Image (cartoon, rainbow, N blue to C red):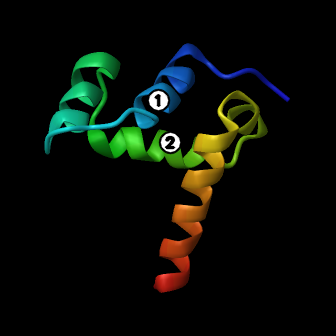
Amino acid sequence: MGELSERDRAVLELEGRQWRTAGAKERAIREELGISSTRYYQVLNALLDRPEALAHAPVLVNRLRRVREARRAAR
């Protein structure tokens, strides 16, 4: 099992925040991480499959896995 990079930890931290206004999350992604929203969600989705991410933020990762599975089932 490898370690999470600084960027991976930052993605998980950003995803765990509460957002008050529309567009605030996308702005934070660009400003804090320096990546596009599309790339952010690609990285986040890949993180959900990593045991290191689960060990780092189990509540967040399990919640996001449930949401992802519900969306897949709805298709």
Q: Residue 42 or 25: which is nearer the viewer? A: 25
- At 69% from the left edge and 28% from the top edge, which residue is drawn? 56
Q: Amino acid at mark 1?
A: Val
- Contact check, label 2 and label 1, Cβ < 8 Å: yes
Q: Residue 5 or 27: which is nearer the viewer? A: 27
Reply above or below: 22 against 28.
Answer: below
Judge left or right: residue 52 versus residue 72. right
- At 28% from the left edge and 41% from the top edge, which residue is drawn? 37
Quarter-of-image position of residue 18: top left
The residue identified by callout 1 is: 11
Q: Earlier in the sequence, mark 2 or mark 1?
A: 1
Q: Callout 1: 10 Å neighbours few (<14), some, many (20+)?
A: some
Q: Amino acid at mark 2?
A: Leu
Quadrant location of the N terminus in the rendered image:
top right
Query: Which mark is on residue 1?
Result: none
Q: Residue 63 or 26: which is nearer the viewer? A: 63
Q: Residue furthest right?
A: 1
Query: Which mark is on residue 44?
Result: 2
